[in-house]
Image (cartoon, rainbow, N blue to C red):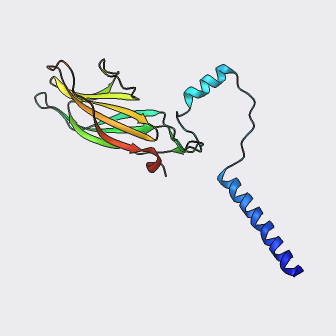
Amino acid sequence: MKKIFWILLAVLVIGGVIYMNANKSIAPEKEIVAPESDSTRLETADKQPQGADMLTGSYGLAGVEWIFTEIKPGDGMNAPVVQARVQLVGVTHPDGRKIEVAPWRLSQEQGSCSEIDKPADEKVAALSYAQCWWAGGGNQFRAVRDGNMLRVDVRGVDEEEESPATFKQLVVIDLASIAK
């Protein structure tokens, strides 16, 4: 009977040690850092991706960049054809790991494309806007973050119309699913 007791005790101790070591590799100990001054804290916050939070499971995202690659050049009479993509910048896992993400293909557009300022009629707080334009019309894009989702919307614009069309969802990117 004593022999069984000691064997069970040894198994429990070894199991506890294994469990404790497994948790250390998953959740490393926190580093003790001297308090920062308010000015240092503000400078650091500007450089880090926004939104990463291990407690809520949210992924960090510093922003987006629009990538426009000319597929077929224009000739003055015909518009150039452009591949529109969006690049997620500064994506981080909730535990702080940086994640590299490939550009996301959106659409083929006609005209000249570039990032633009927030349109005057726009009420949504988007991360960034872009526009493809040719001969008085084109498409506008906006990138909107909602939790772990990044939504890219598109709308048609025409210089002849008084008010632009409503933005419609083009693509939704789930940070949690692409970052695994």
- Residue 52 in percent (x, y) is at 55, 38
Out of 128 and 14, give the one closest to the viewer: 14
The answer to whether residue 82 is above or below residue 20 is: above
- Residue 51 in percent (x, y) is at 52, 35
> What residue is shown at x 22% (from left), y 36% (from top)?
109
- Residue 167 in percent (x, y) is at 27, 31
In this image, 131 relative to 20: left or right?
left
In this image, 34 relative to 64: left or right?
right
Report which quarter residue 144 is drawn in: top left
> What residue is shown at x 46% (from left), y 38% (from top)?
147
> What residue is shown at x 67% (from left), y 20% (from top)?
38
Report which quarter residue 47 is drawn in: top right
In this image, 26 relative to 85: left or right?
right
Report which quarter residue 160 is drawn in: top left
Counting every numbered tag in the picture gives 0
Out of 172 and 84, give the one closest to the viewer: 172
Q: Residue furthest front?
A: 1
Q: Residue furthest left?
A: 77
The answer to whether residue 101 is above or below residue 79 is: below
- Residue 3 in percent (x, y) is at 87, 80
